[in-house]
Structure formats: structure tokens, C-alpha cells
Image (spheres, rainbow, N blue to C red):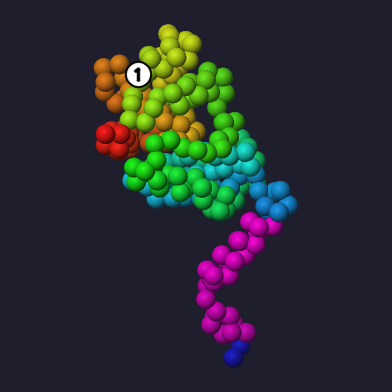
Amino acid sequence: MTSDGLFDALPETDAGTLARLHDRVVAAATADGLLDVAYRTVPSPVGELLLAATEDGLVRVAFGASEQVLASLAERISPRVLHAPGRLDGVARQLDEYFAGRRTSFELAVDRRLSRGFRRTVLARLAEVGYGRTASYAQLAAAAGSPRAVRAVGTACATNPLPIVVPCHRVVRSDGSAGGYVGGAEAKRTLLTLETTGSE
């Protein structure tokens, strides 16, 4: 058998070996303090979610497994980004409990470095809008100390790096209609319905 024939008999990829090598890279990076951003994806009733965490806590929740999101994290936080699901096991478990209606608030360490200024103030106020309740953009603007900044509140919600965990889906228009949402209108309806049903 020629050497060409020998290699032809090998599989093009060995998934098991690749997974073991990846696990070794993650373990070594973690041990050496080189894993700055760990990420994983999880299924959910509102579609696949990408979760990312630094050593300080959950830093990003994104709808869909987007290469653009990972590139943004690499640019804004660190290029040392790895698929390392273990760091996010607790987040995934709490999200499962939330979607199953068994959890009404999250008990997670959160890294808020992706929000600044007034947007960060607005997102901090969102925690005061309880499970199963809603607040208008105007009410949130007033709570954030800038009653006329209704449009800025909308921008803060639209750019929320931690949707669902920081519940921007609970912010609605003054007429009671849902308004926009970073995950899309259907996702917002699903979350509001889930919380309405779960809070009864």
C-alpha cells in the first residue's frame, strides 16, 4: 500500500479527537488565565441563544450564533475568545428554569462593561420592572432621571447586551402595544406571554 493509500483510509476529520484537543486547549487556557471570554449556544423557545461570559460574569446574550457577535466581543473585550460551555453551565440552567416557568428572576454575576453612560443607567432600572409586569418607555425614562429621554430609552433597550436576563422585553409603548425588540417581535410576544402565564 502506498502512503497515499494509507492516508486515504483515514477519515477526513476525527470529531472525537478534535473535541478532546479542544477541551485540552480550553483547560490549558483557563489554567493559565488566558480565557478572557467563554461562549456557548443554547436552544430556547425564542431560538438559539449565544451566551458569553468573562471572569466577572455574563457579558453577552445574543439571539442566534452570530460570528459578528463573537467578532465584536473579540474587538471590545479581548481576542482570547473560546467555545467553553462549562463556564456558562449555571447561566444555561437558569435560562432553562426561566423558560420552564420555574424561575422569575436571575441570580447571576453580570459583567456590564458593554453598556455605558445613560444606557447603563436605563438597563440598571430595568431590574425594577418585575416578572410579569411591563413599563412604558416614558416611565423608564422618568425612573432613569431623564423624563424627556424616551427615545434614548428605546435605544438603550435596542442595544441591551444582556436581553432576557436584563428584561428589556418588559418595556412597551405608552399605548400598551409591544414596540420593538432586539430579538424580534415574535420573541417579545413569547417572553411576555410566558411571564403573564407564569405570574398568574
Q: Which residue sits at x=61%, y=88%?
A: 2
Residue 44 vs residue 64, the one in the foreground = 44
Is 57 displayed left or right of 62 in the figure?
right
Horizontal and vertical percent position of residue 39: 54, 48
Q: Amino acid at mark 1?
A: Ser
**Residue 149 percent location from the top left of the image:** 44, 12
Task: Describe residue 84's horizontal placement relative to residue 146 as left or right.
Answer: right
For disc 1, the marked residue is 136
Residue 117 at x, y = what percent? 56, 19
Q: Quadrant of the N terminus?
A: bottom right
- Element class at badge 1: strand
Which residue is farthest top?
148
Q: Residue furthest bottom?
A: 1
Q: Is residue 184 left or right of residue 5?
A: left
Residue most toward the right?
32
Please tell me which residue is depicted at 61% across the width and 61% down the height of the picture: 23
Q: Is residue 16 in view? A: yes
In the displayed structure, would residue 125 be above or below residue 94? above
Q: Which residues are magenta?
A: 3-28
Q: Residue 14: within the magenta? A: yes
